[in-house]
Image (cartoon, rainbow, N blue to C red):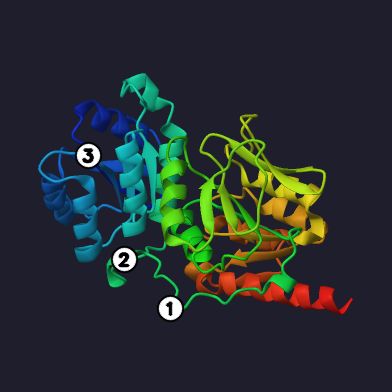
């Protein structure tokens, strides 16, 4: 008996986009388009009639924008949603808000909105639909302000004598990662070691992501720039479309940003970041692999652990998609598996223990 296909409802005010999305999805053996809608009001009726497994939802539409519809949908009938966003400043800000409200992921429309351009996105679109179909939903409405509630109380300071500028925290994430990263960074104190982050995200969206985190966290958060010094109390987000790697200049850590070939089909690639940290930080690093589809970062985390780093993986129950953490655990790359809401505390506990040992030496 053939397995049941993933039923997809495509919502977009462009007839061209609806047609090409349908062709892309229907060309896959494990999914099909059960319906299309030109606006959210039409989509509302089709959801009730067709019971789709996944919704692809345009951001900007007539009668009701995608964000308003998403908020109502996640409150009244939660289901996996992949947002389809234009590559604009407004589009990137709305995409970030959509992820906060509970959308599983987003894809960008090609710049020209033309048929051939969108066909290049076929693998990305279908991969994200598969991930959404198997994702664990995070319901933002229950918490009011976001899919992951802010910490009830901030983590205490590390105390300067325990802090070494040699220590470094690195984080890799993919599907569901924007909110997972927020949950970790919000809990870090301003005297924590420098943090480097590789989140699978297209060009044009990481700036909004970093700016949003900077308003929510006690540490400073920014997009990484090539050649800048990596400082304690700061987090550096890999720019979309670029790899982020660590290097050294004398005693200082320095960020390296480049557009070399994609690794594991990703740029930024988590493996690129983790490999560079294994080489240049070794036992002074702490590695975190969070929710995400696929296996990017698993091998790099193993190399970090082999170089003496302490490593963490997010547990299955708190992941939107357990793919990357599972691969890291299977490789033997992980020292500790923790729920998301305990991850920052685990990292800081390790830092305090490391500092106390260093002070006794």
Asked whether residue 303 appears in the rendered view, the answer is yes
Q: Which residue is mark 1?
A: 152
Query: Depth-wise, is mark 1 or mark 3 nearer the camera?
Result: 1
Mark 3, secondary structure of its residue: loop
In the visual, does 206 lie left or right of 271?
left
Q: Earlier in the sequence, mark 1 or mark 3?
A: 3
User: Residue drawn at (43%, 45%), measured in percent from left and top?
Assistant: 128
Crowding at dot 2, Cα within 10 Å, few <14 / some 14-19 / many 20+, comes out as few
User: Total marks drawn?
Assistant: 3
State the CA–CA distance, disc 1 to disc 3. 35 Å
Query: Depth-wise, is mark 3 or mark 2 nearer the camera?
Result: 2
Front-lying residue, 115 or 70: 70
Residue contact at pointers 3 and 2, CB within 8 angstroms: no
In the visual, does 166 lie left or right of 44?
right
Crowding at dot 3, Cα within 10 Å, few <14 / some 14-19 / many 20+, comes out as some
In the visual, does 32 lie left or right of 178?
left
State the CA–CA distance, disc 1 to disc 2. 13 Å
User: Residue drawn at (29%, 58%), measured in percent from left and top?
Assistant: 79
Q: Which residue is mark 2?
A: 145
State the CA–CA distance, disc 3 to disc 2. 22 Å
Asked whether residue 1 appears in the rendered view, the answer is no
* Residue 319: image location, x then y, percent: 49, 64
Q: Which residue is mark 3?
A: 60
Mark 1, secondary structure of its residue: loop
Front-lying residue, 337 or 93: 93
Q: Quadrant of residue 205?
A: top left
Please identify the quadrant where the C terminus is shown. bottom right
User: Residue drawn at (31%, 21%), measured in percent from left and top?
Assistant: 114
Front-lying residue, 125 or 194: 194
């Amino acid at each position: 008996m053939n397995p049941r296909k993933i039923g997809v409802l495509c919502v977009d005010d462009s007839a061209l986009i609806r047609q090409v999305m349908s062709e892309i999805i229907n060309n896959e053996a494990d999914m099909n388009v059960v319906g299309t809608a030109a606006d959210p009001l039409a989509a509302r009726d089709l959801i009730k009639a067709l019971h789709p497994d996944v919704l692809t939802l345009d951001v900007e539409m007539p009668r009701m924008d995608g964000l308003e519809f998403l908020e109502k949908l996640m409150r009244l009938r939660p289901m996996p949603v992949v947002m389809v966003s234009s590559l604009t400043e407004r589009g990137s800000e709305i995409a970030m808000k959509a992820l906060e409200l509970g959308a599983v992921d987003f894809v960008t429309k090609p710049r020209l909105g033309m048929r051939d351009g969108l066909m290049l996105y076929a693998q990305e679109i279908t991969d994200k639909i598969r991930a959404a179909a198997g994702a664990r939903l995070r319901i933002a409405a229950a918490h009011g302000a976001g899919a992951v509630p802010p910490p009830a109380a901030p983590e205490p300071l590390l105390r300067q004598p325990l802090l070494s500028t040699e220590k470094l925290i690195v984080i890799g994430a993919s599907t569901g990662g924007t909110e997972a990263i927020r949950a970790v960074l919000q809990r870090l104190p301003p005297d924590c070691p420098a943090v480097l982050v590789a989140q699978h995200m297209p060009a044009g969206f990481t700036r909004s992501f970093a700016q949003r985190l900077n308003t929510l966290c006690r540490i400073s958060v920014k997009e990484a720039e090539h050649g800048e010094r990596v400082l304690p109390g700061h987090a550096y987000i890999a720019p979309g479309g670029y790899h982020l790697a660590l290097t050294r200049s004398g005693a200082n850590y320095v960020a390296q940003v480049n557009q070399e070939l994609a690794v594991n089909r990703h740029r930024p690639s988590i493996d690129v970041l983790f490999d560079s940290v294994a080489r240049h930080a070794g036992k002074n690093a702490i590695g975190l692999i969070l929710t995400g589809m696929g296996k990017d970062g698993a091998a790099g985390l193993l190399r970090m652990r082999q170089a003496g780093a302490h490593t963490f993986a997010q547990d299955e129950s708190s992941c939107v998609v357990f793919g990357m953490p599972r691969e890291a655990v299977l490789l033997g790359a992980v020292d500790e598996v923790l729920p998301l809401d305990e991850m920052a505390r685990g990292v800081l506990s390790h830092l305090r223990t490391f500092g106390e040992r260093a002070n006794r030496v």
